[in-house]
Image (tube, helix red, strand yellow):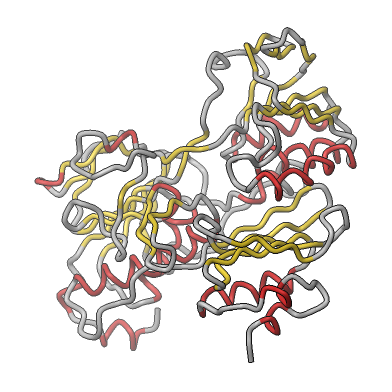
Amino acid sequence: MSEQQRTQRPDRQAERRVVIAGAGMAGVQTAVALREQGFTGTVTLIGAEPHQPYDRPPLSKAVLLGKAEESAFDIDFEGLDIALRLGCEVTGVRAGAHELDTSEGPVPYDVLVIATGAEPVVLPGSEGVPGVHLLRTLDDAARLRPVLDAGHTVVVVGAGWIGAEFATAARAAGCRVTVVEAAARPLAGALPAEVAAPMAAWYAEIGADLLTGARVARVEPGAVVLADGRTLPADAVVVGIGARPATRWLEGSGVALGPDGSVTADAALRTSLPDVYAVGDCASFPSARYGARLLVHHWDNALQGPRTAAAHVIGAAGEDGPEPPAYDPVPYFWSEQFGRFVQYAGHHGGADTLLWRGDPAAAAWSVCWLRDGVLVAVLAVGRPRDLIQGRKLIEAGTRLDPGRAGDPSVPLKSAAPQ
């Protein structure tokens, strides 16, 4: 932040204290956005892990495979005057006192931003069993690296995004991999059956075994026992069956939580408590674009939401100017798996038309979802141009000609009526 920016801001901001609970992508980006937008008060970033704040996507790729030792953010926290309190766990909020309770005692705030992210769902009965792993933190990745280095036999529970990425990395490291999925297909909770079903063949391509419709009865040291009696040998078990907002610490605080455990933020990412905001994986928000409340557990949401929250924090502090815009993004995520680059933009819930662009048995294809003729979501496998063009069309609320949109030889942007 320049000296000119500092001098242009009202002095009344200088004494305000913003405390951010959570030092992942969403928390870090909130702190940075506050400074970039000219906030001159105190900014304190509190993280439960002892490590310097880091990015999570490389954990299932470069860090896991030993191609990188860490993925710390390249941010000059001291230069931005952002105070870090690491290895400090948040335990509650006392709104009346404007205090955040932590493992190191209470921390007073004028504005609190909740950015505690999500936590992995634990496979019941696997807690404490030797050789069972999750993959969410830097320490998780560090514990898994020797497993890959040794080329062990690995069972992955869950054929979602994390399960697919880990299976890809484990096979690249020479491990024998079996993926167990309770549903009838991979990505059952993320994509419709006709879209997810062709992805099952990707596992065999890299030499991984995929067992669908297979429920885990129990995990034992060295083995996974399925409900049908089959026993799978396992030097290591990696559980990737989903994540839930890390919000249990907020119970009884007065912060309203949804049935999914998310903080129910409004369009400005404010919570039900005064002077308390929420961003990233722990927060859901109302989308006027889709007419639904969205909970988005992806990197881009943790990057974009903080800019909106920071603008509203500064506006609430008395900054002159128009009301900052509401948060209503086109959700976006990407995944690298099975030698493919998979991207998704939008939200296909409520769509009434599905269009294929290309053959799903081929190396590259995409899918478009329309609602009342308007593009609302696109999934692109090895077709990044479809994703780029589709995302812009979704943002603009563009109506497409279904015949042209379903022709993979026609640029997606050219499917809009002239």
Residue drawn 74% across and 74% down?
A: 385
Residue 225 image offset from top left, x and y in percent: 70, 11
Residue 388 image offset from top left, x and y in percent: 66, 74
Question: Considering only vertical position in the picture, is 183 above or below 64?
Answer: above
Q: Report the front residue among 94 and 179.
A: 179
Residue 209 image offset from top left, x and y in percent: 83, 29
Question: Considering only vertical position in the picture, is 246 above or below 328?
Answer: above
Determine which quarter of the picture holds residue 131: top right
Circle count: 0
Horizontal relation, residue 233 to residue 388: left or right? right
Q: Residue farthest to the left?
A: 96
Residue drawn 33% across and 71% down?
A: 326
Residue drawn 37% across and 67% down?
A: 288
Residue drawn 69% across and 53% down?
A: 335
Determine which quarter of the picture holds residue 344: bottom right
Q: Quadrant of the N terminus?
A: bottom left
Residue 390 image offset from top left, x and y in percent: 64, 73
Question: Considering only vertical position in the picture, is 2 above or below 56?
Answer: below
Q: Quadrant of the C terminus?
A: bottom right
Determine which quarter of the picture holds residue 14: bottom left
Horizontal relation, residue 302 to residue 144: left or right? left
